[in-house]
Image (cartoon, rainbow, N blue to C red):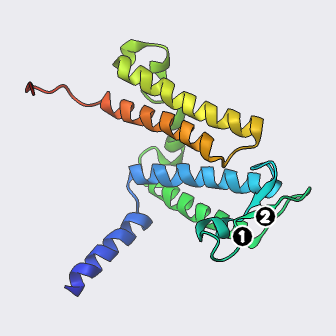
Amino acid sequence: MSSELGDKQSGIISMITDPSKCTANWFIGLSMWGILLAILNILGCVHPSYHYSWGGLFSFEMTNLAYEAKSDSAQFVASDAVFIAICSLFMSLGFKAYAKTEDGVAGFFMGLFVNDTWPALASIEEGGIQRTLAAWSTLLGFVFYIYFGINNMGWMDPGVYSVSIALIAFGFALNHASRVPEGEDNLD
């Protein structure tokens, strides 16, 4: 029984330390987003009146307050350093996985812009109406988040998250649905 538990634990650890390409995409994307939020938080641009404490947010204020009064100058606290270190660790694990691929780390950045989803913004023939709607939904989700963040200093607002995540998730779901092969059996 203990060997089964050890196999499961080593499997989880190896999934984190040696992620697949899909997991590496998530590690890199979420880490880049986290580092951007941490830098904006340090500069005081993440919220109009608060400075976030990552330790307080992630511990549900068991360690310290999550929201502190914002000062006029840049604020750097220990939880910012820890959060940036954690994001950097996961980003390096993602880039390590991409370094093993044929295209390397440059393939990740090129894949963000050169893929078969973005051409569907202008043409239904690129993947059908589903992929066109997926591309537009994903783009609108990211544009809405960036616009709201810049315009209202609301980078961590639950309202902007709910709108942008719904659009982005709908875009991802439609994009994957557009790639499903046609079935042979009729389910009627």
**Outermost residue, right direction?**
72
Q: Pick the residue in front: 113 or 2.
A: 2
How far is disc 2 from disc 1 in space, using C-alphas? 7 Å
- Numbered tag placed on residue 65 in the rendering: 1
**Cβ–Cβ below 8 Å for labels 2 and 1?**
yes
Measured as percent of width and height from the top left, residue 164 is found at 56, 37
Q: Amino acid at mark 2?
A: Glu
Q: Which residue is mark 2?
A: 68
Q: Position of residue 66 (x, y in %)?
A: 69, 65
Q: Judge left or right: residue 53 versus residue 33.
A: right
- Residue at 74% across, 50% down: 46
Q: Quadrant of residue 5?
A: bottom left
Judge whether 81 appears above or below 181 on screen.
below
Amino acid on which the number 1 mark rests in the picture? Leu
As helix, strand or loop, the secondary structure at mark 1 comes to: loop
Report the side of 187 relative to 78 (left or right): left
Location of the N terminus (image quadrant): bottom left
